[in-house]
Image: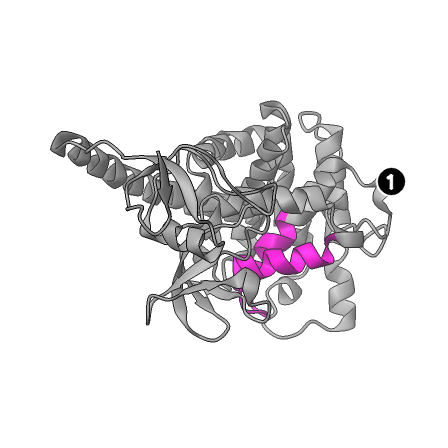
Amino acid sequence: MKARVNQIKEGYILLEDVVVNRNQVIIRKNTVITNELIQVLKAYLVKEIEVQVAKLVSEQEASSEKQEVSLRREMDGSFISQYLQVSEHYKEMYLDWGRGAIIQIGQIREILLPLLEGANHYLYQIFSLHHYSTKEAYIYQHPVAVSLIANLIGRNIGLSKGECIQLAIAGFLIDCGMCKINPSITLKKGTLSKDEYEEIKKHPIYSYQMVKNISTLNHESKLAILQHHERMDGSGYPLKIGQAKIHTFSQILAVADVYHAMTSERVYRKKQSPFKVLEEMTQDSFGKFDIQYVQALIKAISNFSVGTKVRLTNNEIGEIVFINPQNPIRPLIKMENNNNFVNLLQHVDLYIDEVI
Protein backbone atom coordinates (compact mmCIF):
# COMPACT_ATOMS: atom_id res chain seq x y z
CA MET A 1 0.00 0.00 0.00
CA LYS A 2 1.01 3.59 -0.56
CA ALA A 3 1.60 5.49 2.67
CA ARG A 4 2.62 9.04 3.44
CA VAL A 5 5.94 9.23 5.25
CA ASN A 6 4.43 11.18 8.15
CA GLN A 7 1.96 8.32 8.69
CA ILE A 8 4.19 5.24 8.49
CA LYS A 9 5.32 3.41 11.60
CA GLU A 10 8.38 1.51 12.70
CA GLY A 11 8.22 -2.12 11.58
CA TYR A 12 6.66 -1.55 8.14
CA ILE A 13 8.41 -3.27 5.24
CA LEU A 14 9.47 -1.29 2.19
CA LEU A 15 8.15 -2.81 -1.06
CA GLU A 16 10.05 -0.63 -3.52
CA ASP A 17 13.46 1.03 -3.68
CA VAL A 18 13.34 4.63 -2.51
CA VAL A 19 14.90 6.70 -5.29
CA VAL A 20 15.83 10.38 -5.09
CA ASN A 21 17.49 12.68 -7.61
CA ARG A 22 16.17 10.45 -10.43
CA ASN A 23 18.58 7.54 -9.97
CA GLN A 24 19.99 7.59 -6.43
CA VAL A 25 18.72 4.67 -4.35
CA ILE A 26 18.84 5.61 -0.67
CA ILE A 27 16.91 2.67 0.82
CA ARG A 28 16.49 -0.76 -0.78
CA LYS A 29 13.19 -2.63 -0.97
CA ASN A 30 12.45 -5.26 1.68
CA THR A 31 14.11 -3.02 4.30
CA VAL A 32 12.30 -2.94 7.65
CA ILE A 33 11.45 0.68 8.46
CA THR A 34 12.93 2.11 11.67
CA ASN A 35 12.42 5.50 13.29
CA GLU A 36 15.86 6.49 12.02
CA LEU A 37 14.92 5.59 8.43
CA ILE A 38 11.74 7.64 8.76
CA GLN A 39 13.99 10.59 9.60
CA VAL A 40 16.11 9.78 6.53
CA LEU A 41 13.01 9.85 4.31
CA LYS A 42 12.00 13.18 5.76
CA ALA A 43 15.52 14.56 5.32
CA TYR A 44 15.33 13.69 1.61
CA LEU A 45 11.83 15.22 1.39
CA VAL A 46 10.24 11.90 0.36
CA LYS A 47 6.44 12.29 0.60
CA GLU A 48 5.17 8.72 0.28
CA ILE A 49 6.43 5.17 -0.13
CA GLU A 50 5.09 1.69 -0.93
CA VAL A 51 5.00 -0.44 2.23
CA GLN A 52 3.33 -3.40 3.88
CA VAL A 53 2.69 -3.96 7.57
CA ALA A 54 5.19 -6.42 9.02
CA LYS A 55 3.89 -9.60 10.61
CA LEU A 56 4.06 -9.88 14.37
CA VAL A 57 7.03 -11.83 15.65
CA SER A 58 6.18 -14.66 17.99
CA GLU A 59 7.81 -14.94 21.42
CA GLN A 60 9.57 -18.09 20.23
CA GLU A 61 11.00 -16.29 17.18
CA ALA A 62 12.04 -13.33 19.32
CA SER A 63 13.77 -15.66 21.79
CA SER A 64 15.53 -17.45 18.93
CA GLU A 65 16.68 -14.13 17.51
CA LYS A 66 18.12 -13.08 20.89
CA GLN A 67 19.99 -16.39 21.11
CA GLU A 68 21.43 -15.81 17.64
CA VAL A 69 22.60 -12.32 18.61
CA SER A 70 24.18 -13.69 21.80
CA LEU A 71 25.95 -16.46 19.85
CA ARG A 72 27.12 -13.96 17.23
CA ARG A 73 28.67 -11.75 19.91
CA GLU A 74 30.39 -14.77 21.41
CA MET A 75 31.79 -15.72 18.00
CA ASP A 76 32.91 -12.13 17.43
CA GLY A 77 34.96 -12.29 20.61
CA SER A 78 36.37 -15.63 19.51
CA PHE A 79 37.47 -14.13 16.17
CA ILE A 80 39.27 -11.23 17.84
CA SER A 81 40.99 -13.65 20.21
CA GLN A 82 42.08 -15.68 17.20
CA TYR A 83 43.42 -12.53 15.51
CA LEU A 84 45.47 -11.64 18.60
CA GLN A 85 46.77 -15.22 18.85
CA VAL A 86 47.88 -15.17 15.21
CA SER A 87 49.62 -11.85 15.89
CA GLU A 88 51.52 -13.56 18.73
CA HIS A 89 52.48 -16.38 16.35
CA TYR A 90 53.70 -13.77 13.89
CA LYS A 91 55.83 -12.21 16.62
CA GLU A 92 57.48 -15.57 17.33
CA MET A 93 58.17 -16.08 13.61
CA TYR A 94 59.46 -12.54 13.20
CA LEU A 95 61.96 -12.94 16.04
CA ASP A 96 63.07 -16.29 14.58
CA TRP A 97 63.53 -14.71 11.13
CA GLY A 98 65.71 -12.06 12.73
CA ARG A 99 67.90 -14.87 14.07
CA GLY A 100 68.22 -16.36 10.59
CA ALA A 101 65.31 -18.82 10.42
CA ILE A 102 63.80 -19.58 7.00
CA ILE A 103 60.21 -18.56 6.25
CA GLN A 104 57.92 -21.61 6.25
CA ILE A 105 54.86 -20.99 4.05
CA GLY A 106 53.21 -24.19 5.29
CA GLN A 107 53.40 -22.92 8.87
CA ILE A 108 51.92 -19.57 7.81
CA ARG A 109 49.04 -21.23 5.96
CA GLU A 110 48.31 -23.39 8.99
CA ILE A 111 47.70 -20.40 11.28
CA LEU A 112 46.42 -17.90 8.70
CA LEU A 113 43.79 -19.87 6.77
CA PRO A 114 41.49 -20.49 9.78
CA LEU A 115 41.66 -16.76 10.57
CA LEU A 116 40.75 -15.87 6.98
CA GLU A 117 37.81 -18.27 7.12
CA GLY A 118 36.62 -16.63 10.32
CA ALA A 119 36.99 -13.19 8.77
CA ASN A 120 34.86 -14.26 5.83
CA HIS A 121 32.00 -14.95 8.25
CA TYR A 122 32.53 -11.90 10.47
CA LEU A 123 33.71 -9.32 7.98
CA TYR A 124 32.62 -6.34 10.05
CA GLN A 125 35.12 -7.28 12.78
CA ILE A 126 37.86 -6.08 10.43
CA PHE A 127 36.38 -2.63 11.01
CA SER A 128 37.37 -2.88 14.69
CA LEU A 129 40.91 -4.26 14.39
CA HIS A 130 42.46 -0.85 15.02
CA HIS A 131 40.94 -0.87 18.53
CA TYR A 132 43.29 -3.71 19.47
CA SER A 133 46.44 -2.15 18.08
CA THR A 134 49.00 -0.99 20.65
CA LYS A 135 52.19 0.99 20.16
CA GLU A 136 54.32 -1.91 21.39
CA ALA A 137 52.58 -4.65 19.39
CA TYR A 138 51.91 -2.69 16.18
CA ILE A 139 54.89 -4.14 14.29
CA TYR A 140 53.52 -7.66 14.90
CA GLN A 141 49.79 -6.95 14.50
CA HIS A 142 50.04 -4.82 11.38
CA PRO A 143 50.96 -7.59 8.87
CA VAL A 144 48.16 -9.82 10.18
CA ALA A 145 45.63 -7.00 9.85
CA VAL A 146 46.89 -6.13 6.35
CA SER A 147 46.46 -9.77 5.40
CA LEU A 148 42.81 -9.71 6.52
CA ILE A 149 42.04 -6.36 4.89
CA ALA A 150 43.68 -7.36 1.60
CA ASN A 151 41.67 -10.61 1.60
CA LEU A 152 38.50 -8.55 2.14
CA ILE A 153 39.31 -6.24 -0.80
CA GLY A 154 40.19 -9.23 -2.97
CA ARG A 155 36.85 -10.91 -2.24
CA ASN A 156 34.97 -7.70 -2.98
CA ILE A 157 36.57 -7.26 -6.42
CA GLY A 158 35.92 -10.87 -7.41
CA LEU A 159 39.29 -12.57 -6.98
CA SER A 160 39.16 -16.36 -6.63
CA LYS A 161 39.60 -18.02 -3.26
CA GLY A 162 43.08 -19.19 -4.26
CA GLU A 163 44.09 -15.69 -5.35
CA CYS A 164 42.78 -14.24 -2.09
CA ILE A 165 44.85 -16.73 -0.09
CA GLN A 166 48.02 -15.87 -2.00
CA LEU A 167 47.24 -12.17 -1.58
CA ALA A 168 46.68 -12.66 2.15
CA ILE A 169 49.97 -14.55 2.55
CA ALA A 170 51.74 -11.70 0.76
CA GLY A 171 50.10 -9.28 3.20
CA PHE A 172 51.30 -11.41 6.10
CA LEU A 173 54.87 -11.13 4.79
CA ILE A 174 55.05 -7.48 3.65
CA ASP A 175 57.15 -6.45 6.64
CA CYS A 176 59.15 -9.61 7.26
CA GLY A 177 62.27 -7.73 6.11
CA MET A 178 61.90 -5.34 9.06
CA CYS A 179 63.60 -8.04 11.12
CA LYS A 180 66.82 -7.22 9.25
CA ILE A 181 66.74 -3.60 10.45
CA ASN A 182 68.21 -2.59 13.81
CA PRO A 183 65.43 -2.65 16.47
CA SER A 184 66.68 0.72 17.70
CA ILE A 185 65.16 2.07 14.46
CA THR A 186 62.03 -0.08 14.09
CA LEU A 187 61.03 0.42 17.74
CA LYS A 188 62.16 4.02 18.10
CA LYS A 189 59.58 6.12 19.96
CA GLY A 190 60.64 9.47 18.58
CA THR A 191 60.81 10.86 15.05
CA LEU A 192 63.13 9.00 12.71
CA SER A 193 66.17 10.80 11.34
CA LYS A 194 66.59 11.05 7.58
CA ASP A 195 69.13 8.21 7.57
CA GLU A 196 66.90 6.03 9.75
CA TYR A 197 63.92 6.61 7.48
CA GLU A 198 66.03 5.70 4.45
CA GLU A 199 66.92 2.44 6.17
CA ILE A 200 63.22 1.72 6.88
CA LYS A 201 62.49 2.28 3.19
CA LYS A 202 64.73 -0.67 2.37
CA HIS A 203 62.47 -3.18 4.13
CA PRO A 204 60.52 -4.17 0.96
CA ILE A 205 63.85 -5.18 -0.61
CA TYR A 206 64.87 -7.14 2.49
CA SER A 207 61.42 -8.78 2.52
CA TYR A 208 61.68 -9.72 -1.15
CA GLN A 209 65.14 -11.20 -0.64
CA MET A 210 63.71 -13.39 2.11
CA VAL A 211 60.87 -14.76 -0.06
CA LYS A 212 62.23 -14.74 -3.63
CA ASN A 213 63.41 -18.37 -3.55
CA ILE A 214 60.31 -19.84 -1.86
CA SER A 215 58.79 -22.17 -4.46
CA THR A 216 55.42 -22.41 -2.69
CA LEU A 217 54.86 -18.65 -2.94
CA ASN A 218 53.75 -17.47 -6.38
CA HIS A 219 55.42 -14.72 -8.40
CA GLU A 220 52.52 -12.29 -7.95
CA SER A 221 52.79 -12.48 -4.16
CA LYS A 222 56.54 -11.91 -4.28
CA LEU A 223 56.01 -8.85 -6.48
CA ALA A 224 53.38 -7.54 -4.08
CA ILE A 225 55.78 -7.84 -1.15
CA LEU A 226 58.40 -5.88 -3.07
CA GLN A 227 56.03 -3.27 -4.47
CA HIS A 228 53.51 -2.55 -1.68
CA HIS A 229 55.03 0.89 -1.02
CA GLU A 230 55.10 1.89 -4.69
CA ARG A 231 52.57 4.47 -5.87
CA MET A 232 50.84 4.88 -9.22
CA ASP A 233 52.44 8.29 -9.81
CA GLY A 234 55.95 6.93 -9.19
CA SER A 235 56.33 8.65 -5.82
CA GLY A 236 56.69 5.45 -3.80
CA TYR A 237 59.66 3.26 -2.92
CA PRO A 238 61.97 1.36 -3.19
CA LEU A 239 62.05 1.37 -7.02
CA LYS A 240 59.88 4.46 -7.77
CA ILE A 241 58.04 2.62 -10.55
CA GLY A 242 54.74 3.84 -11.99
CA GLN A 243 51.29 2.36 -12.50
CA ALA A 244 52.18 0.31 -15.59
CA LYS A 245 54.66 -1.83 -13.64
CA ILE A 246 52.78 -2.19 -10.34
CA HIS A 247 50.95 -5.50 -9.98
CA THR A 248 47.30 -5.68 -8.92
CA PHE A 249 48.25 -7.49 -5.71
CA SER A 250 50.71 -4.69 -4.92
CA GLN A 251 48.06 -2.00 -5.37
CA ILE A 252 45.61 -3.86 -3.10
CA LEU A 253 48.26 -4.31 -0.41
CA ALA A 254 49.14 -0.62 -0.68
CA VAL A 255 45.56 0.32 0.21
CA ALA A 256 45.32 -2.25 3.03
CA ASP A 257 48.71 -1.24 4.41
CA VAL A 258 48.00 2.51 4.52
CA TYR A 259 44.47 2.07 5.85
CA HIS A 260 45.52 -0.04 8.83
CA ALA A 261 48.62 2.05 9.52
CA MET A 262 46.64 5.28 9.67
CA THR A 263 43.90 3.82 11.88
CA SER A 264 46.36 2.27 14.36
CA GLU A 265 48.16 3.54 17.42
CA ARG A 266 51.88 3.71 16.64
CA VAL A 267 54.97 4.83 18.53
CA TYR A 268 55.17 8.10 16.60
CA ARG A 269 51.56 8.75 15.52
CA LYS A 270 48.11 8.52 17.09
CA LYS A 271 45.39 6.44 15.47
CA GLN A 272 42.72 8.09 13.32
CA SER A 273 39.09 7.25 12.65
CA PRO A 274 38.55 4.75 9.80
CA PHE A 275 36.10 7.20 8.25
CA LYS A 276 38.59 10.05 8.33
CA VAL A 277 41.30 7.80 6.88
CA LEU A 278 39.07 6.56 4.07
CA GLU A 279 38.07 10.13 3.26
CA GLU A 280 41.73 11.15 3.10
CA MET A 281 42.62 8.10 1.01
CA THR A 282 39.80 8.90 -1.41
CA GLN A 283 41.15 12.43 -1.79
CA ASP A 284 44.72 11.14 -2.19
CA SER A 285 43.81 8.19 -4.40
CA PHE A 286 44.24 10.08 -7.66
CA GLY A 287 47.84 9.42 -8.61
CA LYS A 288 48.73 7.24 -5.64
CA PHE A 289 46.15 4.47 -5.13
CA ASP A 290 43.86 2.71 -7.57
CA ILE A 291 40.46 4.16 -6.66
CA GLN A 292 38.63 0.87 -7.27
CA TYR A 293 40.45 -0.77 -4.35
CA VAL A 294 39.81 2.17 -2.03
CA GLN A 295 36.12 2.05 -2.99
CA ALA A 296 36.00 -1.72 -2.46
CA LEU A 297 37.26 -1.20 1.08
CA ILE A 298 34.81 1.65 1.68
CA LYS A 299 31.92 -0.49 0.46
CA ALA A 300 32.92 -3.44 2.61
CA ILE A 301 33.42 -1.42 5.78
CA SER A 302 30.39 0.83 5.40
CA ASN A 303 28.14 -2.23 5.13
CA PHE A 304 28.82 -2.89 8.80
CA SER A 305 28.82 0.61 10.23
CA VAL A 306 25.17 1.18 11.17
CA GLY A 307 24.85 1.32 14.96
CA THR A 308 28.47 2.36 15.46
CA LYS A 309 29.01 5.06 18.08
CA VAL A 310 31.21 7.91 16.91
CA ARG A 311 32.67 11.18 18.12
CA LEU A 312 32.56 14.05 15.63
CA THR A 313 35.12 16.79 15.23
CA ASN A 314 32.90 19.10 17.30
CA ASN A 315 33.43 16.59 20.14
CA GLU A 316 29.78 15.50 20.17
CA ILE A 317 28.86 11.81 20.32
CA GLY A 318 26.28 10.09 18.14
CA GLU A 319 25.30 6.85 16.44
CA ILE A 320 25.42 6.04 12.74
CA VAL A 321 21.85 5.31 11.65
CA PHE A 322 22.04 5.48 7.86
CA ILE A 323 24.71 5.08 5.20
CA ASN A 324 24.31 7.00 1.94
CA PRO A 325 25.19 4.49 -0.81
CA GLN A 326 26.73 7.24 -2.97
CA ASN A 327 28.96 8.54 -0.16
CA PRO A 328 29.10 5.95 2.64
CA ILE A 329 31.84 7.69 4.60
CA ARG A 330 29.49 10.65 5.22
CA PRO A 331 26.54 8.97 6.98
CA LEU A 332 23.54 10.22 8.92
CA ILE A 333 24.25 10.54 12.65
CA LYS A 334 21.76 10.51 15.53
CA MET A 335 23.24 12.73 18.24
CA GLU A 336 23.32 11.37 21.76
CA ASN A 337 22.76 14.62 23.65
CA ASN A 338 19.55 15.76 21.92
CA ASN A 339 18.48 12.94 19.51
CA ASN A 340 18.82 15.34 16.57
CA PHE A 341 19.97 13.98 13.22
CA VAL A 342 23.09 15.33 11.52
CA ASN A 343 23.61 14.53 7.83
CA LEU A 344 27.37 14.78 7.21
CA LEU A 345 26.68 15.26 3.51
CA GLN A 346 25.28 18.64 4.44
CA HIS A 347 28.09 19.52 6.89
CA VAL A 348 31.28 19.43 4.83
CA ASP A 349 33.28 21.03 7.66
CA LEU A 350 32.32 18.22 10.04
CA TYR A 351 33.47 14.60 9.95
CA ILE A 352 33.77 11.54 12.14
CA ASP A 353 36.86 12.01 14.28
CA GLU A 354 36.82 8.79 16.25
CA VAL A 355 34.95 5.50 16.48
CA ILE A 356 34.20 4.74 20.13
**113 left or right, relative to 61:** right
Q: Residue 8 location, x and y as percent?
A: 31, 46
Q: What main secondary structure does the magenta stretch of the protein show?
A: helix
The quadrant of the picture occupied by the N terminus is top left
Badge 1 is on which residue? Answer: 244
Q: Residue 121 location, x and y as percent?
A: 42, 33
* Few, some or many residues within 10 Å of mark 1 (<14, 14–19, 20+): few
Name the amino acid, label 1. Ala
Q: Residue 262 location, x and y as percent?
A: 59, 60
Above-or-below relation of 55 to 339: above
Q: Nearer the viewer, residue 75 or 109?
A: 75
**120 left or right, relative to 81:** right
Which scheme is used to colour this image of the protein? one colour
Q: Nearer the viewer, residue 115 or 45?
A: 45
Q: Is residue 173 highlighted in magenta?
A: no
Q: Residue 125 location, x and y as percent?
A: 43, 45
Q: Residue at x 74, y 45 (%)?
A: 290
Magenta span covers which residues?
A: 256-285
Q: Which element is circle 1 on?
A: helix
- Tally of marks: 1
Q: Residue at x 62, y 58 (%)?
A: 279
Evaluate whether residue 127 shows in this view: yes
Q: Residue at x 67, y 54 (%)?
A: 282
Q: Nearer the viewer, residue 193 or 247?
A: 247
Above-or-below relation of 231 to 71: below
Evaluate whether residue 99 shows in this view: no
Q: Residue at x 67, y 61 (%)?
A: 182
The quadrant of the picture occupied by the C terminus is bottom left
